[in-house]
Amino acid sequence: MRPDQPKYKTSEEVDFVIIGSGAAGGILAKELSTNGFRVVVLEQGPYLSESDFTHDEIKVLKEDLLTNHPKLQPNTFRKTPDEKAKHQRALVYGRCVGGTSVHFTANFWRFHEIDFIERSKIGPIPGTGFADWPITYADLEPYYTKVEWEVGISGLAGASPFDPPRSKPYPMPPLPVKSSGVVFERAARKLGWHPFPTPMAILSQPRPGRGACANCGFCLAFGCEVGAKSSSLASVIRVAERTGRCEIRPNSYVHRIETDAAGRAVGAVYFDKQRNTHLQKAKAVVVCANGAETPRLLLLSANKQFPEGLANSSGLVGKYLMLNSYATAAGLFEHPLNDYKGFTASRVLHDFYELDPQKTGFYGGGGLDARFDFTPITFAMGGYPVPGATGGLPPGAPRWGKAFKDAIRYNFTRTMRIGCHGTSLPLEANSFSLDPDLKDAWGLPALRMTYKNHPDDLKLATWQKDRALELLEAAGAQKKWHDPIEEDNFAFHLLGTCRMGNDPKTSVINPDHRTHDVKNLFLCDGSSLVTSGRGQPTMTIEALAFRAADRITALAKRGDLAA
Amino acid sequence: MDNALSRRHFLSHGIMGLSSTWLATHWPAVVAAADHAHSAVQSATPPQFEFFSSEQATEIVAISARIIPTDDMPGAREAGVVYFIDRALTTFASEDQKIYNTGLPDLQASVRELFPAVEKFSSATPGQQDEVLLSLDEHAAAPPRPFRPRPDAQTFFETLRQHTIAGFLIDPEAGGNRDGVGWKVIGREHEHIFQPPFGYYDKDYPGWQPPAKDADKK
């Protein structure tokens, strides 16, 4: 079914080894191999495809078919650096070819101009690492367009008055509206807000080799059986494979980047499925392992020459972690919405993208969307992906017995949620680092997460939650409620941990995604972000990846990567 | 089994939106996967239990029938939840075996403590059964009467509660929710794919229109 891939020997020095095959790694693999380079992609997870995907909630949600495994890869968590971290699951990410893009929601908003220059606009925020990006929206615009057309995004250009300028419309119309979207749109308009069809990385029309969305309803957290979700797996990786120059090597867990006496990367050291160790040699190394595993790999690669970890002269590798502020409200309606059908979110609004701190009293902004992000089981009892996550029933609802059955019977088809997505501020203390005690199943130091929300992030979540409740009120919900606003101890969005900048003292990579310290080492994924955006990072990660591929190609072609 | 073949039905009939290239590329593999899933379902409801003794199974059926009781609609009993749990305890939930092994006797002790004349949970009246479970529910308000804390039974009840719900609502092709009765209860249509309109509110939706006066925003 798949085209034959080249099989490179590990001793053969390929042009690029890419670590991670997710949103960024897949695009870099496609671009670099299309540009004529020999590429090996090392992916720690298995190579699954459409026929492996399933609606089995146990396999997918409980047994982590597509995601990092808490038993093999345990984590620890603490709120502040002076605490000892405790063992708990702290994050979820995709662990298969295609990475997190296989199971994500596929919300694909672009960042706006403000996200890149906000520090200059509103001034410093004491105690934070709030900074401008070294690139602007205009630099990235062509690449956003490239994502939309090459990866496959559905949406309606010009539907939001707050949208940033774009050079081209979307390649295909929005997906059909859901009942939650209609309810949301009508109520938002009553309030004078500007709802619009959510841009989604899901095909509304078939493409060669891929089906259009079949509205099966097992979308968020699941892999798409018809290739409609625009994961790296369904889109760019297949193109990379067809070049005949790109080898995707699954079940390859990279745990060290090897350097030579001159301080250059020579390749990536990994465990294969049988836990044998190999070194894949390459002229340059591109790490796209996500905002948790990328800094971890750099820290694991410490050696005599780089005692604090590779590319860490700034001391910032792993720091300035941002998760995106989040809150949810939910409503119950008189008639069935049947929102279990279809994809997750069909309407969104960006009226609060740019709030004025002088008026609100806090920094931040965001977007609200109409969504249904439950499966039948998680609706009835919550618990995914962390113990204690709320289900679809209101707080205090019965948990068993006739009253419980009545509640799921009435509510399942009549419930919708509003997701309130927003900014989070970069704080140096918030980080991923190596746990000093806990080891993973391979004997390597486990990921330790340190995180305490900036108070403004919580204020924003509360403020947006109040708007969501206002909307549900205007929509005539029979009942409305919200999840408690609490400090985070679990990460979905893994952002900012190897931030981009011009100054090697205050950033890890330069605007070409090249590490300041190692000439032939590049990083591109959520870790590259300087600010968090308003809650939907993958579109920007992918635009950065297309741009990084252009920059890296230019450097390679003029011999700037050679020793 | 009226709808247990919905995935295959989807494959043979639900081709709307799938390009012919996609079908040509993926059809054989997906049919193979669907067949496999189907035979897994067939073998997932064995006539014999692998983990439970028949006495234990009777108790589990009785408890899960109070967690999701049968009324005018089917409950855990009709969904064959006990078979799902039996399989779970020898596969993905094997680490929970101990909870069942220690928790069920502890729960039965609770039955005798509250109702000395009653031997087993399954021989108690529904009212008595609910009282026992209420006494073990950490989330319930005040227990109906003072009781001896039984951590093993409480953990067991919470675990069984979750397993019962999972076995009632999981995709039938994944080995529970027999005949899709759990989905019937919650109003989830047993189809593999859907087409708009999805619900009441999008039925007459005219399509997205720009708001009347947009120029004054932004």
Image: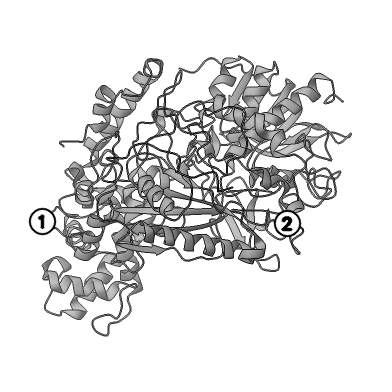
Label 1, secondary structure: give it. loop
* Left or right position of A245 against A315: left
Q: Is residue A388 visible?
A: no
B127 to B161, vertically: above or below: below
Labels 1, 2: one chain:
no
Query: Label 1: how many residues lie within 10 Å, few (<14), some (14-19) or many (20+)?
Result: few
Query: Label 2: how many residues lie within 10 Å, few (<14), some (14-19) or many (20+)?
Result: few
Q: Is residue A119 visible?
A: yes
Return the x and y of residue B70 as percentages of the image width and height: 14, 58
Q: Chain of mark 1?
A: B
Task: In this rendered view, identify the residue nearer to me: A435 or A35.
Answer: A35
Residue located 42% across and 40% down the image: A222
**What's under tag 2, amino acid-wise?**
Ile
Question: In this figure, which residue is indicated by the disc labeled 2?
Answer: A122
Q: How many marks?
A: 2
Residue located 40% across and 47% down the image: A185
Residue located 56% across and 52% down the image: A366
Q: Find residue A246 and report its image quarter.
A: top right
**What's under tag 1, amino acid-wise?**
Asp
Q: Find residue A331 and report its image quarter.
A: bottom left
Residue furthest bottom as drawn: B146
Return the x and y of residue A483 as percentages of the image width and height: 44, 63
Q: Which mark is residue A126?
A: none
Task: In this rendered view, identify the residue nearer to me: A92 or B113.
Answer: A92
* Left or right position of A261 against B4: right
Residue furthest right as drawn: A262
Label 2, secondary structure: give it. helix
Question: In this figure, which residue is indicated by the disc labeled 1?
Answer: B72
* Left or right position of A92 against A523: left
